[in-house]
Each structure stands twice: as structure tokens, then as C-alpha cells.
Amino acid sequence: MLYPDASAWHAAPHKRVLVFGMSGLGKTYLAMLLRGAGSWFHYSIDYRIGTRHMGELIADNAMAEAMKVPFLRELLMTDSIYIGSNITFANLAPVATYLGKPGDPTKGGLQIDEYRKRQEQFRVAEIAALNDTPYFIERAERLYGYSNFICDTGGSICEWVDPLDDADPLMTLLSAHCLPVWIKGNAAHTQELIRRFDRDPKPMAYQPHFLTDCWSAYLSQTGNASDRVDPDSFIRWTYARALGHRQPRYEAMARWGVTLSADEVSSLKGEADFNALIATALERRA
């Protein structure tokens, strides 16, 4: 590991971490906390996806919808207005909206083939954004003078790596430049995530074979045709299965770094607390 023990962590002039885990357990809270300390650069994978690797796709999709409205079409055709997404660290809705949900088009659903295409676009974009991490570490220090760096990953990072493979390209690259940190939830956190998702279901990215299995099982269980599936019902049904699918993958990824509990992260008040907690996690690992 980049920091083999607590002493190495405390002595390091450059502290670099990559946080991963289910969305909603504190990754972005931690990144914003450290960013607020003034000496940490916050690299958001989802923000990078939305502004760089999928920005044109998102804008073109919004443009296509706007062009269906005659009033807007005339203004767009004369370059009187333009369409763009306003992505921020706190508002990544344009990415989620583009990903969409499969099912009945009258309920806002996408045809399953279009949904699969966008899932693949997201997979390629997320891997590219993760591979950009070393560049942003160098850029953060060269341009802005940040000596410390936190990579705030999306919940789907575990879908694109094989954490049990010692030669996995992504894990090898990322762990060479950052300390991977798993923010681990417990059973109570899992139930709260499910309740939260049930109230406000959001698009997610899945491994292709996992999506195929879930889609087939849902159609079989409900008897619905593809174009009659309620999009929100499907992704609610899939969410708990996705949690179960991802948990062992996160756990396997943790062997490349250290583990913090979600409760430990939520109790942090500043940079000093975080540095102490990482040192404790390294000691626990030893």
C-alpha cells in the first residue's frame, strides 16, 4: 500500500486517498469536509463523468428533447439560445437523468436497448474518469498547490474491477497513487438506504450481466412486457439486489486499502480527526 502503517501516513507530506462504497454512506460528506479544510483537492468521479466524458451526450440528449418543442426549436436553429447542463459537486442530476430508467415510455422509461446503450456509455466514462486520477493528482499540485488529494468515487466502481485479481488494471493504478478507503455500512444503514431509495428512486449503473438477469427475472415475475414495466418499480425492485451484489465486491476491494465504518465517518469534524482515523484504520489492518 501507499502508506503501509500509521507512522508512514502521519509522516507523508502528500496524503492521497480514494473513497468507495455505496452512495449515501458519506463519501461526498468526507470529501467536502476535507475540501473545506483548505489543503485537500476534491476530485469527484461523477462530476468528471458529467463534465468531460459524458458532457456532450448529456447536452445532445437535452437538445433533442428541446427540439421537439417548436418554439424552442426555432430559437435553437438560429443560435438564439443554447442548451447546457449545470453540473456541480452537489447536483449531479444531469448524469442520472441521462442514464434514465428502463420501461414504459409513457412513464418516462427508456427502451431496454437504449438503456443498455447508455449503461455502456457510463461504464466507459467511469473507467476513463478513474484512469484520470493520476493526472488530477499532478494537476492539483502543479496548478493549485494542493498537497493532499481525495478521489470521491461513484457507487458503481465495484462493477468495473476484479478486486480478487492482483493484476486488476484499475485497482493496480489507483492503489499506486491513493490509499483505497472503504466506507462500510451496517445492516441498519442498508435498511435506511433502501427506505431512502424507495422514497426517491434514482438511476444506477450495473454490470451488463447483472442487469440482464434482473430484467429477465422482473419480466418473468410480473408478466409485464418490456414497454409496460413501471420504471420506478423496476429500479426499486433491483436496488436491494444491487446492494447484495455489491457488498462482497466492496469487501474484496478493501484488501487493497483500509476500512472505515459509516458511523466513524459521520462523526468526523475536521482534517485532524480524519488523519487520526486513517492511522487507526492502518493499525487495525496491521
Image: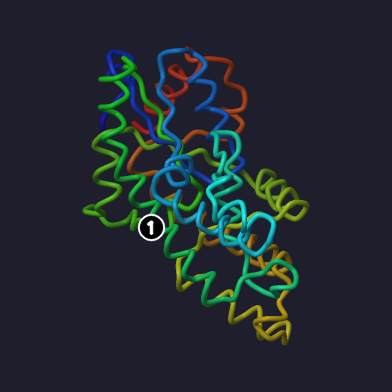
The correct choice, above or below, for 243 with respect to 256 in the image is below
What x and y, as percent, mark residue 124? 37, 58
Q: Residue at x 36, y 45 (%)?
A: 129
Counting the numbered discs, the total is: 1
- Residue visible at 61% across and 61% down in the picture: 67
From the viewer's perspective, tell me whether residue 9 is left or right of residue 121.
left
Colour mapping: rainbow
| Residue at point 57%, 20% (across, down) | 268
Residue 23 image point, x, y percent: 57, 45
Residue, far front: 78
Quarter of the image where one finds residue 104? bottom right
Image height check: is 180 above or below 127? above
User: Compared with residue 79, is residue 44 higher up or lower down, i.e. above or below?
Assistant: above
The amino acid pointed to by label 1 is Trp
Is 161 in front, or is 110? 110
Residue tagged 1: 160
Q: Position of residue 271 (x, y in %)?
A: 48, 15
Q: Nearer the viewer, residue 136 or 15?
A: 136
Q: Quadrant of the N terminus?
A: top left
Name the residue at 66% across, 43% down: 189
Binning the other alpha carbons within 10 Å of mark 1 as few (below 14), some (14 to 19) or many (20 upward) gives: some
47 vs 77, nearest the viewer: 77
In the depicted view, which residue is nearer to us: 50 or 19? 50
